[in-house]
Image: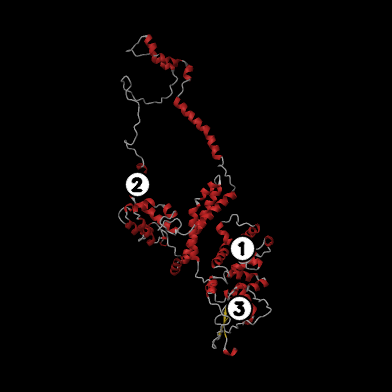
Amino acid sequence: MPVSDPLSWTVDQLVAEICHSAVLYQAAGVSVANIPDGAALEKQLRAREITGREFLNLFDRSEIAVKNALNIASLSQRLALVNVSDLLRSRSYTHDQQAATAGVKSLNISRESRPELPGPSDHTANGRKRKKVTPVTTAPVPKRPQAVQTYVAGPSAGFLPDASADKESWSHLLRWENEAATDDIVDLAAEEYQEEEDEEDEELPEEEEDVEEAPCPSKLSQNQVVDIINERIEFYTTSWKPNKGAARGEEIDYDTVRMWEEAEASGQRKALVQKYNMDHTYFRQRLDTLCDEIVKFPGRNAEQVRRQCCNLEVTVESMELAGWLRDIYSLSPVVNSDEELQDEPQPNDHSPVQQPHPGASMKIIDLSSPSPQSEIEEEMAGKVLEFRRQLSIPDLVIADSAEPAIMPTYSEVVPTRTPINHGDEPEHASIGTVRRWLWTDLMEHLDRKRVVSKAIFELRVDDRELIRNRVWRVGKIATIREIAACVEMLWRGETKLRGVLPRDMPKILVVTDLFLSWWFCRNYFKGPKAPKEELAELKLCIEDGSAEMTTFYDYVHTVMGTTFSEEALQHPERPSQAKIIEISDDDD
C-alpha cells in the first residue's frame, strides 16, 4: 500500500494496487474467487487513464455495479471492486475533507459577489441623520390603573410642576382609568401567533384527509398494465446482445468456444454454471419485484407506464447476460448425433460387403433392439429400403458385426410387409436403436412412447436441451398446467398466455408440441398442425383426465436420463444394455 493518499495515486499506482495485488481485496473482505481479472481491469484503467482521484470520485457503486462502466461481466466481481473503492475512500483523508467542504465551496459568500441594492439614504432632506429602529415586542401591560394614579399623584419633592402642566404631560395616561378600555388591550404578537395556530389546526384535518385519500387511480386495468410490462420486457429481451451499450473499442471479446474450453480445462465449468445461475435467479427476483411495484402503483395512462418500465432495462440486460453465460458453460461436451449422421459416409447399395475376420469371436447384442435374425430379414426386404429412401432416413451401419450384412439388390421386391414389433421398455433403448425406428411402424402400432423418443431424437440439440431443462427444473405439476393452458390457447387461436413472459413462450410451445406428437402419434414438429376440432377433443380429454399427461411427463423425464442422457449423447454408438458374449468357432 503506498504511503500517499489514494486520492493522489497515479494510473500506475492504482493499477499496481487493484490489478496486481490482492491486499486491498483481502482487507475489504472479498474472497479470492470474486477478485476481478487483473489483466482485463488494467486494460480498462489504462485505456481511460483513470487515476486515483477519478476512481474515487467518478466510479461509485452505481457506475461499477449497475452501469458496469469497467466492463466486468461477473456481478460478484463488480461488487468486490465496489468494496475496494469504499475502502479506499475511507482511507483517504483528502477525500473526506473534500466531501465535508463540497457544500461550502458551492456557496459564494464573498462580499464582492453580493449585489449592492440601492437603499434609502442615511440622511433626511433636512440633514438629520437617520437612526436604526429595532422592533421590540413587549409584554402585555398589567391592569393596574391605581399604580399609575399613585405614580402621577406622588412626584418627587425636587420636581413639582403646576397642575396644568401635569395634566397636559400625563393626560395620555388617563385612558387607563377606564376599566373597560383595559379589557381591550391585545398583544398583537400573541394574537398573531394564536391565529397561526388556529390556521394550522384548521388545515390539519384537510391534510389528514389528503393523506387518507387514495392516489389518483389509473385509467388502465391490471391486465393492460401487465401487457405493457410484458411488451417492454420482450422488447428489452429481443434487443439485447452481448456488449450492448459498450463504447466502441471497449467491447469484451466473448469467444464462447475459448471460454468454454478454458473453463473445462481448469475444472471451473460447473462452478461457473452455478455462479451465473445464481446471478440469473437474483436478477429474475429483482425483475419480479420491480414489476410488482409497477402493477401496484401504475401510471395514469400507457405512456406513463412505459416510462416506469424504463427502470427494467438494466435488470433485464443483466439477467440476459447472466443467462447467456450460464447457457454457454452449461453445454456439456455432447456430440450432435444428427450432425454426425449427416457427416458420416452413406453406404452404397452395390458396394461389396466386408467379410468379418474369421478369428472374430465377440459380438455385441443390444437387448432393447430386435434380434439379429429379424434385422437381417428386414434388411433383405426391398420395400423397407424403399421406405427408408422415401423418408430420407439413413441406414445405420453396425460396425464390427459378427455376421455379414446382406444387402438387397434392386430386383428384390417384397410385396407385403408386417410392421415390426419392437418389444417392451422403449425407455431403455439406445440412440442407435431409436435411429432405426421407422415412423410408419410407430404410427401403425400407435406406439406413443417410441414416437416421443423418435421425435426427441430428431430435434435440434438446443431444443432437446430446452426440453430437458424444462422438465427437470419446472416440475411435473407446473409442466402439466403449462401444456393444458397452451393447448387451450391453440384451440382459441391465440399466441400468448396470460401471466407468462414472452421469453418463456417458445419453451412451453416446444414441450407442448412434443405432447401433441404423443397424443396424435406422429411427428407434430414436422407434420401438419391439428385442426380446431381435434384440439377441442384433446381439451376435453385433458379436463376429464384421460389424456395421460402424467404418463407422458414420466416417460420424457425417464428417457432424458437414459436414452438421451449426457453420457449417451457423448457416445451414441453404445447400446443402452450391452452384453458381450464370447462365441467360439465351434458354434458357427
Measured as percent of width and height from the top left, residue 357 is found at: 54, 87
Q: Can see residue 233? A: yes
Does 450 appear above or below 349?
Answer: above
Looking at the image, is mark 3 or mark 1 nearer the viewer? 1
Q: Position of residue 379 (x, y in %)?
A: 62, 80
Q: Earlier in the sequence, mark 2 or mark 1?
A: 2
Q: Residues within 10 Å of mark 2 (few under 14, many from 20)?
A: few
Callout 2 amino acid? Gln
Query: Split into 4 quadrants, where in the image is the C terminus?
Result: bottom right
**Alpha-carbon span between mark 2 and mark 1:** 62 Å
187 relative to 428 in the view: left or right: left
Tell which of 266 and 343 is nearer to you: 343
Label 3 Cα crowd, 10 Å radius (few <14 / some 14-19 / many 20+): some
Q: Position of residue 585 (x, y in %)?
A: 57, 89
Q: Which-is-in-front pick, marks 2 and 1?
A: 1
Counting from the top left corner in percent of width and height, residue 246 is at: 43, 56
Identified by mark 3, the residue type is Leu
What separation in Å lies between label 3 and label 1 (alpha carbons)?
A: 31 Å
Say which residue label 2 marks.
Answer: 98
What amino acid does circle 1 point to? Answer: Thr
Tell me the element at label 3: loop
Vertical relation: 494 (above or below) 136 = below
Checking the image for residue 367, the label placed there is: 3
Provide the residue designation for mark 1: 512
